Image: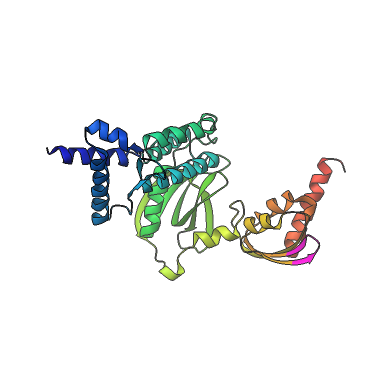
Amino acid sequence: MNSKVMRLLKIYDKLNDGEQLDRNNLAESFQVDERTIRRDINTINDYIDYFKIENKKVIKIKNEKKYELENKKRISKVVLLLLKIILDSRAFNLEEKNLILNELLKRVGTEDRKFINKFIRNENYNYVELEHKSNIIDKIWDLTYFINEQKIINIKYKRSDGKRVNRSLSPLGIVFSEFYFYLLANYENSDNTIVLRVDRIEDINDTSRKYKVNYKDRFKEGEFKKRVQFMYSGEYNRVQFEFEGGNIEAVKDRLPTSKVRIIGDNKYLVTTEVIGDGIIMWLLSQGSKVKVLEPKRLVEKIATEIKNMNEKYNF
């Protein structure tokens, strides 16, 4: 093979592997002058531009005689962020966590791989898998297929009390919240949405039956997540409460549908839309910073819970 072609291919391979290449070292390694290396880099960029390969190009490091592939560094930054999220989520067992980490790290170059591994080493070493220890990657993929194809499925599900049940479901969506992935579904021939933990699904079978949902009426996971807290399904509620002496930004982040009105010095009136009673857990976690105003049913539930808590501490 032509020596120039071999040189270009080797340089391109090194760049694709995420290496940062020194012009002097390249010239010495291939026994050519630096002008030849500059022309090689221009040729590689012309090739990338002509075939529009992943919108990337070879760039020169400012004030240095070094080159790197532009989008490789961007990929490395994205991989680092994804790995941090995965480790913090604790959503996967050890086997699947390691699989995901290894697959993502393959996307970055050698030097960046070393850098990222060093940065996440402690978190990775001290990673604690959840008690269920189930494999969920294949389940999520299969469920996503059935959702896309609008197929009714039959599942074997292990409830929180350990009892196993069989259910025929129309799967609607998958969301992640507080450690777990959840399947949102309707019972066959029902419009009531139920929430099931994916790790508790032990078997999934295609019934060969289909359900029909028009695109405009499809289940919107994002809208559901805005209104549900701790994955408690249930009825739609309009909740209003006073919030005082805390960070209102954290409230709006936790309850994305909130409308906030200032009613005093660091005191706010918050109106929000929620699904189910999961919000009770969050409201109680705010202690005296929150006073719930409506609905009456929710106010009574919270008052009863506070009374029961007081009795446990003999107040």
Residue farthest along the top direction in this orientation: 125
The chosen color scheme is rainbow
- Residue 100, position in %: x, y? 42, 39
Between 70 and 282, the one lying in front of the other is: 70
Quarter of the picture containing the C terminus is top right
Q: State yes or no: residue 147 in magenta.
A: no
Q: Residue at x 46, y 63 (%)?
A: 189
Q: Is residue 19 left or right of residue 264?
A: left
Q: Quadrant of residue 250?
A: bottom right
Quarter of the picture containing the N terminus is top left
Residue farthest along the left direction in this orientation: 1
| Span shown in magenta | 262-269
Q: State yes or no: residue 264 in magenta.
A: yes
Between 243 and 234, the one lying in front of the other is: 243
Q: Residue at x 24, y 37 (%)?
A: 33
Q: Residue at x 22, y 35 (%)?
A: 32
- Residue 226, position in %: x, y? 58, 60
294 versus 311 height, above or below: below
- Total numbered badges shown on the rendered structure: 0
Q: Quadrant of residue 41?
A: top left
Between 27 and 225, the one lying in front of the other is: 27
Q: Is residue 305 left or right of residue 5?
A: right
Classified by dominant secondary structure, the portion drawn in magenta counts as strand
Residue farthest along the right direction in this orientation: 315
- Residue 29, position in %: x, y? 25, 31
Q: Residue at x 40, y 57 (%)?
A: 147
Q: Quadrant of residue 237?
A: bottom right
137 versus 229 height, above or below: above
